[in-house]
Structure formats: C-alpha cells, structure tokens
Image (spheres, rainbow, N blue to C red):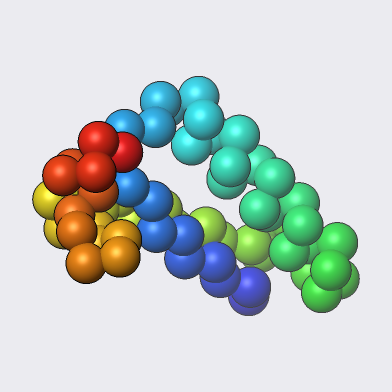
Amino acid sequence: MPFAQVFLIEGRTEEQKRVLIEKVSQALSESVGAPIENVRVWIQEVPKSQWGIAGKTAKDLGR
C-alpha cells in the first residue's frame, strides 16, 4: 500500500488540499502500478510560526 506524507505550511483551502490528494494519489498509482484504492495520502499542516526558512519563521517572513 503506497503512502505519501505531505508537509505544508498552514493556509491552503479545503479545495486545494482535495486536489493535492487527488493528484498525489494518481501519481503514486501510475508510477508504482498500485490500484488507486490502495493509495493513502496524509497532509500534515504546520503552523507558520513552526516552519523555518533561512533562519526565520515563515510567519516572520510573511509567508
């Protein structure tokens, strides 16, 4: 059973996450030949204050 874990900075819409799950599932299914019913995708949203970029938080950078 293929499993993908995706880390994102918080703030995406439900629709954006739905599309991400759909496309990642399709890509995994096609690339490894697994039935799409067996593919699992887990989105982990990280608060902007806990995501670091070049020594600063994403929140401090206005991301």
Q: Quadrant of residue 37?
A: bottom right
Task: Name the residue rendered at 77%, 57% in the picture.
Answer: 27
Looking at the rendered structure, the number of numbered marks drawn on it comes to 0
Task: Name the residue rendered at 63%, 75% in the picture.
Answer: 1
Q: Is residue 59 left or right of residue 8?
A: left
Residue 28 in picture, x, y percent from top left:
73, 64
Q: In this view of the protein, which residue sits in the foreground, 30 or 11?
A: 11
Q: Quadrant of residue 42?
A: bottom left
Residue 46 in picture, x, y percent from top left:
25, 53
Q: Can residue 24 be seen by looking at this rendering?
A: yes
Q: In this view of the protein, which residue sits in the foreground, 50 or 39?
A: 50
Q: In this view of the protein, which residue sits in the foreground, 8 or 60?
A: 60
Q: Is residue 20 left or right of residue 27?
A: left
Residue 41 in picture, x, y percent from top left:
52, 57
Residue 13 in picture, x, y percent from top left:
40, 25
Q: Where the C terminus falls, by quadrant?
A: top left
**For residue 63, above or below residue 38:** above
Q: In this view of the protein, which residue sits in the foreground, 53 or 27?
A: 53
Task: Name the residue rendered at 24%, 62% in the picture.
Answer: 52
**For residue 2, above or below residue 51:** below
Q: Quadrant of residue 33?
A: bottom right
Task: Name the residue rendered at 16%, 44% in the picture.
Answer: 60
Q: Can residue 35 be seen by looking at this rendering?
A: no
